[in-house]
Image (cartoon, helix red, strand yellow):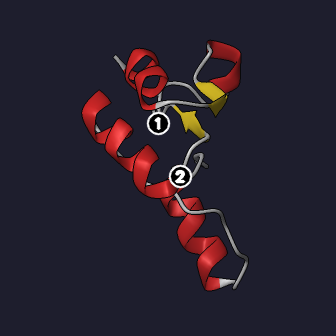
Amino acid sequence: MSRVLTPVEGASYLDKAAIPLVAQKLVSSAEEAAAAALVLGLPVALKLIASAYTHKSDRGGVRLHVQTTREVRDITT
């Protein structure tokens, strides 16, 4: 049975194939997300990581052009 790769697994395959990706950080809280946004540089994109949802954008799980750490916290809380 086939399955969908997690974003971390997908990134690993792309890295092995020398395909560049933008910087990314896996976090598990609103505070970690805000701190990561500062390190990565604003604006950022946020994406829900949940195996139950293959198409995250259909569920509101993708947010683009997030401009501030406050907005990051609000979205991830």
Label 2 sits on residue:
41
Q: Do the residues labelled 2 and 1 touch (CB within 8 Å)?
A: no
**Amino acid under label 2?**
Gly
In the foreground, 68 or 23: 68
- Quarter of the image holding residue 15? bottom right
Can the viewer see residue 26 in this picture? no
**Amino acid under label 1?**
Ile
Query: How many labels sit on residues?
Result: 2
Task: Please identify, in this view, whether the residue under mark 2 or under mark 1 is nearer the observer.
Answer: 2
Can the viewer see residue 76 in this picture? yes
- How far from the left and from the top, in percent, is residue 27? 33, 44
Residue located 70% across and 17% down the image? 58
Residue located 64% across and 62% down the image? 22
Q: Callout 2 environment at 10 Å: few (<14), some (14 to 19), or many (20+)? A: few
- Quarter of the image holding residue 34? top left
Quarter of the C terminus within the rendering: top left
Between the residue at mark 2 and the residue at mark 1, the CA separation in whole angstroms equals: 20 Å
In the foreground, 3 or 32: 32
Label 1 sits on residue:
49
Residue located 62% across and 15% down the image? 60
